[in-house]
Amino acid sequence: MSDKTYTVNEIFYSLQGEGYYCGTAAVFLRFSGCNRKCSFCDTDHHTGTPMTREEIAEACAAFPGRHIVITGGEPLMQLDSDLLRALKAHGFYVQIETNGSLPAPPEVDWVTCSPKDAPWKIDRVDELKIVFQGQDVEETASHFDTPRRFLQPCSGLNTKETIDYILAHPHWRLSLQTHKLLDIR
């Protein structure tokens, strides 16, 4: 193991607001940096604080929950097995939220893929969550092998359109950004 530092945007404790684990108490570890430029991104991932593996693990372990959501930007630009092992030593179940552009380390327990632009190099997907903007989600979904498929309205602006699509294509489930509806982080 090295003295590597990671650039962390923020660490906080809240409820998972989206997808399969919606409503689950979770520590959120948000890394800075992304390799995609999404017009609807609601995260400032250009700033951050350098932290070591031990500093991150200790900061996350200070919260009572042991479900951690590692996100970004794109978390797989920084996340590695060394940090994951340090988090696992504190008993964490590790969920990542990725755009699918990079493969995940084997220590990750749950992969939430919200694909943006191809190419995709993620090697496994436990849950597919697509931000719906009227695009061909079936073509995108055909690249990912998971029965757990969620459509999420883009910033809540097209909820009716998203619901109508799901009613016509019932193999999808609705994912709302409930943390925003509840006015929590």
Image (cartoon, rainbow, N blue to C red):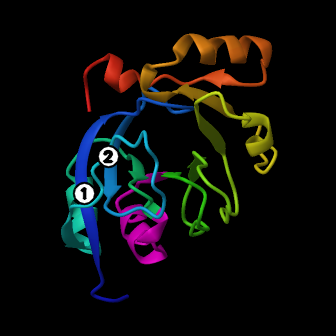
Residue 25 picture location, percent across and down: 36, 33
Q: Residue at x 25, y 26 (%)?
A: 184
The residue carrying pointer 1 sits among few (fewer than 14), some (14 to 19) or many (20 or more) residues within 10 Å by Cα, namely many
Residue 164 picture location, percent across and down: 68, 11
Residue closer to the observer: 24 or 116: 116
Residue 120 picture location, percent across and down: 67, 61
Amino acid type shown at disc 1 = Asn
Determine the secondary structure under disc 2: loop
Q: Do the residues labelled 1 and 2 touch (CB within 8 Å)?
A: yes
Query: Viewed as shown, does residue 79 lie left or right of 106?
Result: left
Vertical side of 122 occupied by 27: above or below: above
The residue pinned by badge 2 equals 43
What is the quadrant of residue 48 in the picture?
bottom left
User: Magenta segment range?
Assistant: 76-96
Quarter holding the N terminus is: bottom left
Q: Residue at x 58, y 65 (%)?
A: 104
Whether residue 32 is in magenta: the answer is no
- Mark toward the viewer: 1 or 2: 2
Amino acid type shown at disc 2 = Thr
- Determine the CA span between mark 1 and mark 2: 9 Å
Q: Residue furthest bottom?
A: 2
Residue 168 picture location, percent across and down: 78, 13
What is the quadrant of residue 169 in the picture?
top right
The residue pinned by badge 1 equals 9
Quarter holding the C terminus is: top left
